[in-house]
Amino acid sequence: MERVPELYGSLVFNDKIMRDKLPKDIYKALRKTIEKGTHLELDVANAVAIAMKEWAVENGATHFTHWFQPLTGFTAEKHDSFISPTDDGQVIMEFSGKELVKGEPDASSFPSGGIRATFEARGYTAWDPSSPAFIKDGTLCIPTAFCSYTGEALDKKTPLLRSMDALSKEATRILNLLGNTAVESVTTTVGPEQEYFLIDKEDYKKRRDLIFTGRTLIGAPSPKGQEMDDHYFGALRPRVAAYMADLDKELWKLGIPAKTKHNEVAPAQHELAPIFDTTNVAVDHNQLTMEIMKKVANEHDFVCLLHEKPFAGINGSGKHNNWSMSTNTGINLLDPGKTPAENTQFLVFLAAVIKAVDEYADMMRLSVASAGNDHRLGANEAPPAIISIFLGDELTAVVDSIENDKFFNSANSVVMETGASVIPHFTRDNTDRNRTSPFAFTGNKFEFRSLGSSASVATPNIVLNTAVAEALSQFYEVLSKVPAESMSNAVHELIKSTIIKHKRVIFNGNGYTDEWVEEAKKRGLYNLKSTPDVLPRLLDEKNIKLFTKHGIYTETEIKSRYEVLLENYSKILHIEAKTLLEMIYHDFAPAVVKFTDSLTKSILSKKQVSDKIPTASEESELLKITSKYEALLDATAKLESDVAKAEGLTDELELANYYHDVIFEDMSAIREITDFIEAYIPDEDLPYPTYSKILFYV
Ligand code: ADP
Ligand code: MG
C-alpha cells in the first residue's frame, strides 16, 4: 500500500495543488472567493478551469461533471467529455471557465414540488468553490448548487450555504458586540458518524424486499439477536476488515478524513466516523462516503445497506451529527473553557442553542423525518421523537446556578479531583454517555443523534444553523441597545432569562421511558411521532417566518419542499406495499403451500399404512399453519385492495396519512403472520435467505 500521506487527497483538487498550479494572483482571487464568497471574475474562472483540467487529465480523467444534490437526497451527475474536435480531425482536451462555473442540466426529471413549470424545464448548476473538486471514476466532479431558471433552489446545498452565511453573520455580530472584535466570520463544523450493515451479495440478490425497498419486509427473528452485546466493538472478521481497509483507502484518496471504524451493536452492523470539517464539506463528504461504501462493498461481494431499519427486532442505523461553531480566529464557540460559569462567550452561545432547539424542535424533528427513520425514532433503539437537550450534570449545575443566582463552585461538583490546586478542565470527559438523548452536549460540541443513516445531513444542519442564527439575532436586538458599561450585567440577565424560558427542553434522564413521554407532554414539548405528523409543521407561520427572514428558503421553496417530502413518503410506502404483495404471492405463499403439501402427504401416507401410527402432532402443526395461511391470504387481499384505493386520493397530505394509517398497518398485520409461519418452514423451502443466514454467516 502506498503511504497514506501520499494517498490522502490524491484525487482532490485541493489547496496545495491550486497553489502549485495557479498563477499567484489567480490563486489569491480564488482564495478570496472561497473564504469571503466574493464574485469570481471570468478570467479567474478561465485560469482555474485550465489548471483543473490539466490536473484532472494528468490523473486519468476524460470527463467532467457538475455534481449536485437534488431533493431526492442522492447526488446527481451528468458527464461531459473534455474533447473538442480540431480542423485536422483530431481532438484536444478543453475546459473553459464558463463550463466550470455554470451548467445547464435539464431539470425536468428532478423533484421540484411544483416550482418548475413544465414550460421551463431548464435548471442550472453553479460552482461551489468552497467544496473542492475531485476525480471519481475518471470524471472530474465539480461540487455545484442546483437552481431553477428563475433562481429557486432545487437542491440541498443552496439552502445549506445560505444557512451557514446566516449563522456566520449573526454570530460575528454578537461576538463583535461582546468585544471580540477580531472575529470576521464563523463557520459551523460537522462530523457525521455513519452506521451501516454489510451483508452477502448472494443473500441480497435473493430478497426482493432488500432490492426494491432496502429493508426486509418479512422475516422471523433469528435465535440469536443482539442480546449478548457481543458485536459492539468486537474484533472485525477478516472479510469485514478487508472491506474497511479498502473503504478507508478510497475515502482517503478523495480527501475524506475517515478516522474511526468499529462494529456496532447489531450483528453485521458497523460504523465509520470522519474527522469533522466545515459543514458544507462534511455534507458533500458524507454523500460521497455513502456512495463509496456501496461501491467498495460490491467489489467485496457484499452489499452495504444504508436503510434506517433493514431488519425488524435488530437495531437500525442512524447518523450522529456532531456540530459546533468555530471562529475564523480558531475558537470553538462551544468549548466552555476552563471556568465555564465565567466564560460568558460560551454561555451566550449555549443559551442560543438551547433557545433555538426549544423554539424549533418541530423543525429539528422534521429535518430527520423519513419513512425509514420512522421505524427508529421512539422505538427505544434511537432517540425518542421528542426533541430535548442533554447537558450533563456539570453543565446543568452551571445553568442552575445562573438561573437561581447562586455562585457556581465547580470544586463542589463532580470534578475529578487530582489534588492539585488547579481546577481540571471539566468538559471533555465528564459528560456521561446518555445514548437516549436526541441532542447531547459532548464536551465541546452538540451531537444531534436523531438522523437516519441514509439521508443527507444537509437538512438537519440547515435547521440547526438557521434556528441558532435566529436566537443570536434576537440576542443582538436586546444587547445592541445596552450601553457599554451595563453590558456584562445585561449579558448575564439575558442568559438567565433565556434559561428560565427554555429550560423545559433540557432533560438529562432516560429518554426511553414512558415517564419521559408523560413529563414532556406536561412541559409542552412536541411529540411528533411520524413523518405525516411532522411535515405539515413546515408550513406553520413561525417556521415560514424563520426561513424567509434569514433568506434560507423563499415561501415558494418551502412549499415545494413540503410537497416533495410528502410525495416521497407516500411513494416509499407504495413501493413497499407492492413489493410485499409480490413477495407473498411469488415467494412466500408458494413456499407455505409446498411445505403444507408435504406435511399433508406425510400424514396421509402414514394413515394409509396404519391408523395406529400417531399423526396428531403433525396434524396440529398442519392445522396451525394452514389456519394462519388462510389469515395471511385474507390480510394480503386487504392490502391489495387498500393499495388500489390509494389511487383515488388526490390530496398529498391525505394520501400520506392514508399510507401511514392504513397501508402501513396492513403491512404490519401481514408481517405478524408471515413471521409466525416462517419459523416452521425449512430453509430449503424458502426462496430467500432467513435472518439467521443473513446476519450470522458473513
Ligand atoms: P462517539 O462515538 O463517542 O460519539 P466519535 O469519535 O465516533 O465519537 O465521533 C465524534 C465525531 O465528532 C467525530 O467525527 C469528530 O471529528 C467530531 N467532532 C469533534 N469535534 C468537533 C467539532 N468541534 N465540531 C464538529 N464535530 C466535531
Ligand atoms: Mg456518537
Image: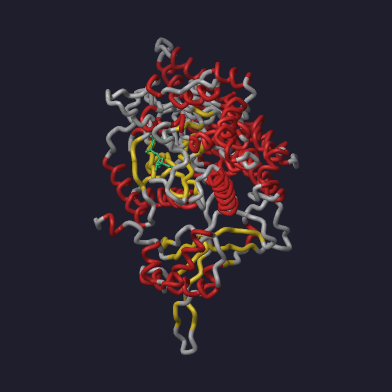
Front residue of 25/278: it is 25
Identified at 67% across, 56% down, the residue is: 152
* Quadrant of the frame with the C terminus: top left
Front residue of 667/127: it is 127
- Quadrant where ligand 1 appears: top left
- Left or right of residue 650: residue 102: left
Quadrant in which residue 610 is drawn? top left
Front residue of 173/561: it is 173
Residue 635 seen from this side: no
- Left or right of residue 665: residue 399: left
Identified at 62% across, 27% down, the residue is: 501
In the picture as drawn, the residue positioned furthest to the front comes out as 485
Residue 679 screen position, x and y as percent = 44, 24
Residue 284 seen from this side: yes
- Left or right of residue 3: residue 609: right
Q: Is residue 115 above or below residue 623?
A: below
Residue 571 screen position, x and y as percent = 63, 43
Q: Is residue 340 above or below residue 322?
A: above
Front residue of 32/696: it is 32
Residue 553 screen position, x and y as percent = 66, 49
Quadrant in which residue 23 is drawn? bottom left
Identified at 68% across, 45% down, the residue is: 563
- Left or right of residue 645: residue 675: left
Quadrant in which residue 539 is drawn? top right
Residue 515 screen position, x and y as percent = 55, 16
Q: How is the image coloured?
A: secondary structure
